[in-house]
Amino acid sequence: MPEPLLQIRDLAVEFSTDDGVVHAVDGVGYDVYPGETLGIVGESGSGKSVSVMSVLGLVPQGRIASGEAIFKGRDLLQMKKRELREIRGGPIAMIFQDPMTSLNPVLTIGDQLVEAIRAHQPNVSRSAAKARVVELLSLVGVPSPERRVNQYPHEFSGGMRQRAMIAMAIANLPSLLIADEPTTALDVTIQAQILDVLKAAQRETHAATILITHDLGVIAELADRVVVMYAGRVVELADVRTIFAAPRHPYTVGLMDSLPSIVEDEEWLNPIPGQPPSLIHPPPGCPFHPRCFLSQGRARCRTENPPLKKIGDSGHLAACHFAEELEGRTSKFAQAAADAAE
């Protein structure tokens, strides 16, 4: 394996509230390798976005209690604000969830992309930067880019605004691209187009990508490896085929079983019972045990928080005391694929 491009180790992020301290991210660690797409999935509030945005200094209300984030040999968490500004939008670029609130409504799309280029490449002239912007808008599929470069964000549709955000993210050829639920606010047909644009952006920059989403279909299409998060912790990590074919954490199984099937009739959906735990007063033991079909009230689940451990000899990791009991169980996705093949 090549050296990781980004190494996150034992990251903990806290928020102070009137009700107590919210442990939004609790001991998270994973690697991102050059050229790969790492998917991060989980329910809302599981710590997906906070775990990534905090290492770039984009969560000012949060306090980083511990951890390190090594990017190309340097710890992002130890950098000063000026150093982080040089990293953001340059070597590490971000595509945010809502492009309308990420773009300045009183500046043209072209001016904003030119500013993004010249902030990191000050020797590039304004005319050369504008020509590059037209190329970028064409690359991400904005029609008539020579004309639309002078338009304002409100003159773009939601899908076109997201294309402009992707163009801005790849403008300085980043090594790492972070996409925070980039298709959430878009309708299904536009989502598919944006996924194609993301693939084109990766081909253009050869960047590694962290894809944050709750959409398992997007993960299945784009990700090479998958991190599953629950209650601020990583509960499973494996390559995408293994995650879908042979999940070894009850939460991952529950996520997949809760989705509707497209190959068989189902009268009812099968949701995960209960609610995510309080991150101010989490339950003792495994944070998933009150909702877990595998726990069955066992004392170990109620008293011991399981570490992330290897499953067999592969790079498959799961944080479950009884992960071996899921051996041989296939997910709904894998079963549907097998039935279709027959």
Image (spheres, rainbow, N blue to C red):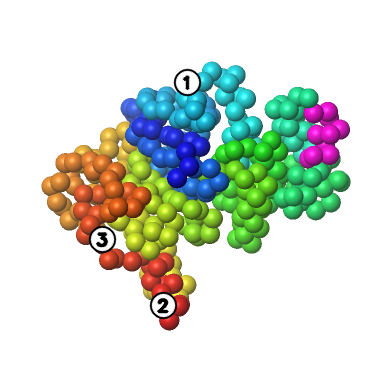
| Residue 25, x across and y down, in percent | 38, 35
Q: Residue 208 in the image: state x and y as whole percent.
A: 55, 44
The picture quadrant where one finds residue 150 is: top right
Distance from Cα at disc 1 to Cα at disc 2:
51 Å
Label 3 SS = helix
Residue 179 coordinates in the image, percent (x, y): 56, 44
Residue type highlighted by circle 1: Gln
At horizontal 36% and vertical 50% (from top left) the residue drawn is: 315
Judging by the rendered image, the residue that carries numbered circle 1 is 78
**Badge 2 density bin: few <14, some 14–19, many ≥20, Cα 10 Å:** few
Which residue is at 34% across, 27% downward?
21
Q: Amino acid at mark 3?
A: Leu
Residue bearing mark 2? 339
- Secondary structure character of the magenta stretch overall: helix
Q: Which residue is mark 3?
A: 326
User: In percent of the image, x 48 and y 42: which residue is there?
Assistant: 2
Q: What element does badge 1 sit on? A: helix
Above or below, comparing residue 21 to residue 241 in the picture: above
